[in-house]
């Protein structure tokens, strides 16, 4: 995915999918950070990132590319922050690895309360991880 007209990270088309941000690196690049966005839920059920906020430091995340190659990352931080903080600083942080000597992985989902006027949730869960290798 790219950015919306409002310069916000776009989202996957359904709650069962994740979406790779096309301005981030791809898994296996060996540098930078892979940024993946997913939904926490929908109107009637949980989405793929419903439990993202529960990931603990050092938890293992395995990403499988379309060609079947797998990459393992270890969680370094998990923060739920205001939408304002996510927009002002969080996304900049998510675009670089938490350890610049290793490839990073950044996972993002919505959280908090729905703001009908803006058609957006007021918080973001931001998980950062680094390659195990």
Image (cartoon, grey):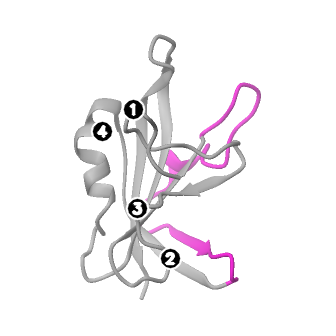
| Residue 116: % across, % down | 51, 12
Which circle's residue, 2 or 4, is located before the other in the chain?
2
Which circle's residue, 3 or 4, is located before the other in the chain?
3
Quadrant of residue 102 in the image? Answer: bottom left
Query: As displayed, is residue 43 above or below residue 31?
Result: above
Judging from the image, what secondary structure is the residue with disc 3 in? loop
Q: Mark 1 packing: few (<14 Cα in 10 Å), some, or many (20+)?
A: few
Disc 3/disc 2 C-alpha distance (Å): 13 Å
Q: Mark 4 packing: few (<14 Cα in 10 Å), some, or many (20+)?
A: some
For the point 33% across and 31% down, the residue is: 82
Q: Which mark is residue 6?
A: 1
- Observer-side mark, 1 or 2, equals 1
Q: Which residue is mark 2?
A: 27
Judging from the image, what secondary structure is the residue with disc 1 in? loop
Query: As displayed, is residue 52 above or below residue 97?
Result: above
Disc 3/disc 4 C-alpha distance (Å): 16 Å
| Residue 120: % across, % down | 48, 25
Which circle's residue, 1 or 4, is located before the other in the chain?
1
Q: Which residue is mark 4?
A: 87
Q: Are marks 3 and 4 in contact (CB under 8 Å)?
A: no
The residue segment tinted magenta is: 40-68
Disc 1/disc 3 C-alpha distance (Å): 16 Å
Quadrant of residue 99 in the image? Answer: bottom left
Q: Which residue is mark 3?
A: 23
SS majority, magenta:
loop
Which residue is situated farthest in the bottom direction here? 133
Viewport quadrant of the C terminus? bottom left
Judging from the image, what secondary structure is the residue with disc 4 in? helix
Disc 2/disc 4 C-alpha distance (Å): 24 Å
| Residue 89: % across, % down | 23, 45
């Amino acid at each position: 995915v790219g950015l919306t007209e409002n310069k916000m990270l776009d989202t996957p088309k359904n709650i069962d999918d994740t979406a790779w941000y096309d301005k981030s690196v791809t898994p296996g690049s060996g540098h930078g950070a892979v940024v993946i966005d997913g939904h926490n839920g929908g109107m009637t059920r949980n989405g793929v990132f419903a439990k993202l906020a529960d990931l603990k430091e050092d938890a293992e995340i395995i990403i499988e590319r379309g060609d079947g190659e797998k990459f393992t990352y270890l969680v370094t931080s998990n923060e739920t922050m205001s939408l304002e903080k996510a927009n002002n600083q969080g996304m900049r942080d998510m675009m670089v690895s938490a350890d610049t000597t290793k490839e990073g992985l950044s996972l993002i989902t919505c959280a908090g309360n729905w703001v009908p006027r803006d058609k957006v949730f007021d918080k973001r869960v931001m998980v950062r991880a680094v390659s195990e290798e």
